[in-house]
Image (cartoon, rainbow, N blue to C red):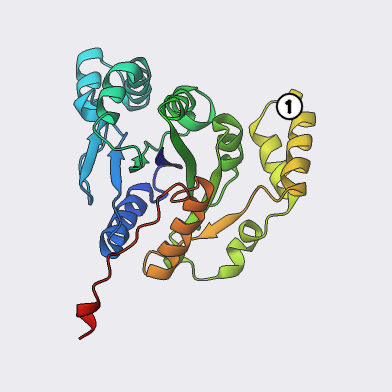
Amino acid sequence: MGYAQLVIGPAGSGKSTYCSSLYQHCETVGRTMHVVNLDPAAENFDYPVAMDIRELISLEDVMEELGLGPNGGLLYCMEHLEENLDDWLTEELDNYMDDDYLVFDCPGQIELFSHVPVLKNFVEHLQRKNFNVCAVYLLDSQKCCGLFLTAMVQLELPHINILSKMDLVTNKKDIEDFLNPEPQVLLSELNQRMAPQFSKLNKALIELVDEYNMVSFVPLDLRKESSIRYVLAQIDNCIQYGEDADVKIKDFDPEDDD
């Protein structure tokens, strides 16, 4: 069984910085993790890229050859990825072991995880390949919004909501509503972003979320190793990372004690 994080969130929420910091943390503690670039417009990386969608298609080529703008071009690229799940992605995944841990750094276009089925179909493909997947939704702690609710409904995955850039927050009271979310606030956010005919469904969803404590937020301060370690532990728990691992018994040589 493989393990995967799908790192999503609006542009500028700190997804790539999160992936880079997570990779560095794992490297420090001696843990193997592979970061995958799913953004066809990305250019610079602060982490080794294990897989790169630009080997399949790039936004620059699409805009030049088809005359599309950035948004339309990005959607075209992701739909092309969707069409090549059984070819390109499967071939790339075959390079990894059953227990490998992949982190997918996704584009920041909101439609990809709220309205179109591209990422949902991508996730289902991973699950068919025996991957446990968790959605990691990053929200800028200074620009919190309720889009994570739409992503939760769309992707149907275990979900960790992370408040990023906590090192820039000067007044912690500004994010109190997100660290301790009120059901009515969440309902209001959801109703504003969905058609009126979904109001009853939204109410039932929020009641379910409230009853089972399904929505929570984890603050992330990248300056602190303890904060990164805590976030990673929450995600590992979601995808049951390490639960199937064999117990490793280290050989003991009595002569070493002399």
Which residue is more in the foreground, 27 or 70? Answer: 27
Compared to residue 137, the image places residue 79 above or below, namely above
Q: To which quarter of the image does residue 202 belong? A: top right
Task: Please give the name of the residue rendered at 57% of the width and 40% of the height, measured from the top-left corner.
Answer: 147
**Callout 1 environment at 10 Å: few (<14), some (14 to 19), or many (20+)?**
few
Corner quadrant of residue 187: top right
| Image quarter (top left, top right, bottom left or bottom right) of the C terminus | bottom left
Give me the residue at 23% from left, 40% from top.
50
Q: Which residue is mark 1?
A: 198
The amino acid sitting under disc 1 is Phe
Which residue of the protein is positioned furthest toward the bottom in this rendering? 258
Q: Is residue 139 visible?
A: no
Q: Please determine whether, in this image, residue 258 is positioned above or below residue 136.
A: below
**Residue 12 visible somewhere in the drawing:** yes
| Residue 113 % position (x, y) | 49, 32
Residue sitting at x 56%, y 69%: 172
Q: Secondary structure at mark 1?
A: helix
* Tally of numbered tags: 1
For the point 32% across and 22% down, the residue is: 77
Horizontal and vertical percent position of residue 11 = 40, 42
